[in-house]
Amino acid sequence: MSSSSSSLKALVAFMAVATVAELAAGSKTWAIKWASGGNYGDWSSKNTVAVGDSVVFTYGTPHTVDELSAADYTACSFAAPLSSDAGGSTTVVFDKPGTRYFACSSGSHCSMGQKVAITVSNSTAPPSSSKGGSSSYGAAAGGGAELASKLVVGLAVGAGAILAL
């Protein structure tokens, strides 16, 4: 194998590793201070959550973070939660687009507004600078979907160049 072929392979490998690192750094972690009396009704309209992002709910007793179906969310019914946690810090990682529903099962907290519908998109748009209600967010840069596309294209082009040698 020639020196230029080895150099090209090394370059392609380096680019792939760099792109994967950039992809991993592209997700955001959002923080929601989960408390009764919080205004979470418009959280998704003020915060752009993308696939790969996570939300960390932080709260004290007696609060819970229950994931519900859309119907149970609307009715504040906790008869069949998809998941439930009362540990004080609940992290949810979003692996696909769609809307997921969370509420507090303590007392009448849900009916008083301690619930949030989080809409997840493939969008890489930057988050709004507004921090509504009792929520806040911390962000890392970038969006995963665009970087994943770059990785696939880069690897395909690199593999074609190596095969042509």
Image (cartoon, rainbow, N blue to C red):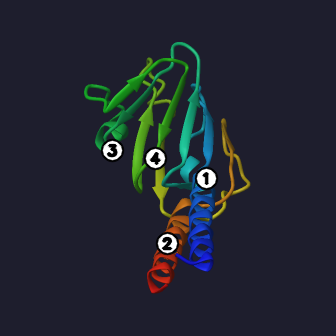
Question: Which label belongs to residue 70?
Answer: 3
Question: For the residues marked 3 and 2, what is the alpha-carbon distance in whole angstroms?
Answer: 40 Å
- Please name the amino acid that badge 2 sits on: Leu
Task: Name the N-terminal-most of marks 3 and 2.
Answer: 3
Given contact means CB atoms under 8 Å apart, are the residues at marks 1 and 3 in contact? Answer: no
Which is more foreground, mark 1 or mark 3?
A: 1
Dot 4 and dot 3 residues touching (CB under 8 Å): no
Name the foreground residue: 33 vs 122. 122
Is residue 123 something one can see in this rendering? Answer: no
Mark in front: 2 vs 1: 2
Q: Nearer the viewer, mark 4 or mark 2?
A: 2
Mark 1 residue crowding within 10 angstroms, few (<14) / some (14–19) / many (20+)? many
Q: Which mark is residue 94?
A: 4
Residue 70, image x and y in percent? 33, 44
Residue occupied by mark 1: 47
Image coords of residue 30 (percent x, y)? 61, 42
User: Observer-nearest residue: 161 or 46?
Assistant: 161
Which one is earlier in the sequence, the residue at label 1 or at label 3? 1
**Position of 163 relative to 81 (above/below):** below
Q: CA distance from mark 1 to mark 4?
A: 14 Å
The amino acid pointed to by label 4 is Phe
Q: Which residue is mark 2?
A: 155
Separation (CA) of disc 4 from disc 2: 26 Å
Point 32% across, 26% down: residue:
78
Q: Residue at 44% across / 18% down in the picture?
A: 106
Q: Residue at x 49, y 84 (%)?
A: 165
